[in-house]
Amino acid sequence: MIYRRLRDLREDHDLTQNEIASLLHVVQSRYSNYERGVSNMPLDCLVCLADFYGVSTDYLLGRTNISKPYPVTKQRKNN
């Protein structure tokens, strides 16, 4: 599920756990726990990784097998 996809994406990009941990501003052991499913990943880290890898959060969460991210919508302007 999510944990397998995290590892597969990291390895597909030839990155180490240390490099991804640095991107997320966590220590390597914490990221390792996310990847192994020992700890739940915070939402901000999930979104960061989805943006970094160019996939949707649903793909990371195993809710879809389509990795393409959703189109970005325009935010409303505050009046």
Image: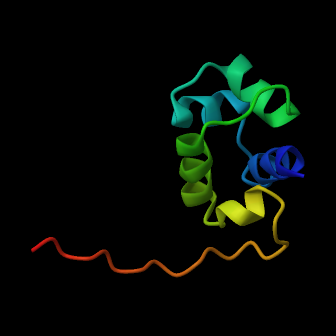
Give the number of callouts. 0
In which quadrant of the rendered view does residue 52 lie?
A: bottom right
Residue at the (68%, 36%) spot, across then down = 41
Is 67 or 15 nearer to us in this picture?
A: 67
In which quadrant of the rendered view does residue 57 lie?
A: bottom right
Q: Is residue 43 left or right of residue 59?
A: left
Q: Is residue 58 left or right of residue 72?
A: right
Q: Is residue 26 above or below residue 50?
A: above
Q: Is residue 42 above or below residue 33?
A: below
Which residue reaches farthest left? 79
Q: Is residue 52 above or below residue 24?
A: below
Residue at the (62%, 30%) spot, across then down = 21
Q: Quadrant of the C terminus?
A: bottom left
Residue 39 in percent (x, y) is at 77, 27
Residue at the (72%, 53%) spot, across then down = 13
Please name the colour scheme applied to the rendered image: rainbow
Is 41 or 17 nearer to us in this picture?
A: 41
Q: Is residue 58 left or right of residue 51?
A: right
Q: Is residue 63 above or below residue 46?
A: below
Is 40 or 3 nearer to us in this picture?
A: 40
Residue at the (41%, 80%) spot, across then down = 73
Residue 50 in percent (x, y) is at 61, 57
